[in-house]
Image (cartoon, rainbow, N blue to C red):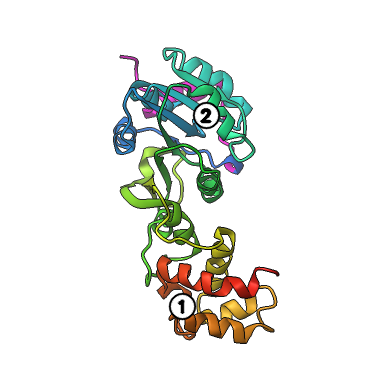
Amino acid sequence: MHKDIATPLRTKEILGKYGFSFKKSLGQNFLIDPNILRNITEHAGLTKETAAIEIGPGIGALTEHLARTSGKVVAFEIDQRLIPILDDTLSPYDNVKIINEDVLEADVQSIIQKEFEGFDDIMVVANLPYYVTTPIILKLLMERLPIRGICVMLQKEVGDRISAKPGTKEYGSLSIAIQYYTEAEMVMTVPKTVFMPQPNVDSAVIRLTKREKPPVDVKDEDFFFTVTRSSFAQRRKTILNNLTSQLPQGKEKKESILEALSEAGVDPTRRGETLSIQEFGALSDALYPHFKES
């Protein structure tokens, strides 16, 4: 068994050898606790039949655990300076491929087809750079990739928002967007001390399991997401006020909005955070005929 990369000593050794300095702009916080990494791979439910996609491998701490527990790993690393380090630290493993690309720009669908032939079970597992967590997760879900799910370390506050239930202050359009595609659960919280350098926020691991089909069947998905985003534009406002000010020609169409709210059985004085995903589905379907041209 090779020495774990994820120990404070080994991490310092590797960084020293390459004279590597952390870039704040890339949100680089490396994990230095092998137990946390083992927990992440367990929560992801990996076997040798699983292919894993990683984003932001850093110096390979999690990548190494993925290589040991899954059949193949493809990792996207945006920082050119880390490529030679990863070639070195991951040299004991022949089932890892590093792609020096920004995952937000990458054609992940075609990379999956090319790299994961013969794998039916694909899981995204990563310690995500905190400043781009949400766009990365939404991209992976909206592109309808053939994945089983996503198990990632992120800022605890974002994890709370993703897994939030209606009626809580964390619940918002992000909760709805992600719960539309997946079942979301927070599986562990993680102390700051297991990172180098330590982030100034608490972290958590969230597991998103892709749904066979969304929990609500809507006439138009894009419009459904427009309605949910509009409903949370100003949290203290009522749903009627938010929709009137946010939807295209909302002010002129106030009567239509009231009509749609009534049709969906939603009291216009409620706030967005009190509506369930099913109520948003009914509301967006009732509004759609009035707004589909605009």
> Mark 2 or 1, which is nearer the eye?
1
Secondary structure state at the residue bearing disc 1: loop
Task: Give above or below for 142 relative to 235.
Answer: above
17 drawn magenta: yes
82 drawn magenta: no
Depth check: 40 or 247 in front? 247
Residue at image point 46% right, 46% down:
199
The amino acid at mark 2 is Ile
Secondary structure state at the residue bearing disc 2: helix
Q: Position of residue 93 (x, y in %)?
A: 42, 15
Task: Give above or below for 212 relative to 46.
Answer: below
Question: Does any portion of residue 75 appear in the rendered image?
Answer: yes
Q: Quadrant of residue 24?
A: top right
Determine which residue is flagged by label 2. Answer: 112
Residue at image point 48% right, 39% down:
29
Lower position in the chain sequence, tag 2 or tag 1: 2
Question: Does any portion of residue 19 appear in the rendered image?
Answer: no
Mark number, residue 90: none
Magenta residues span: 1-24
Q: Position of residue 99 (x, y in %)?
A: 58, 25
Q: Position of residue 263 (x, y in %)?
A: 48, 81
Q: Quadrant of residue 149?
A: top left
**Mark 2 neighbour class, 10 Å CA radius: few under 14, some 14 to 19, many 20 or more:** some
Depth check: 207 or 33 in front? 207
The amino acid at mark 1 is Ala
Describe residue 245's horizontal placement relative to residue 30 as left or right.
right
**Mark 1 neighbour class, 10 Å CA radius: few under 14, some 14 to 19, many 20 or more:** some
Residue at image point 46% right, 78% down:
264
Q: Position of residue 65 (x, y in %)?
A: 36, 26
Task: Give above or below for 169 relative to 267.
Answer: above
Mark number, residue 264: 1
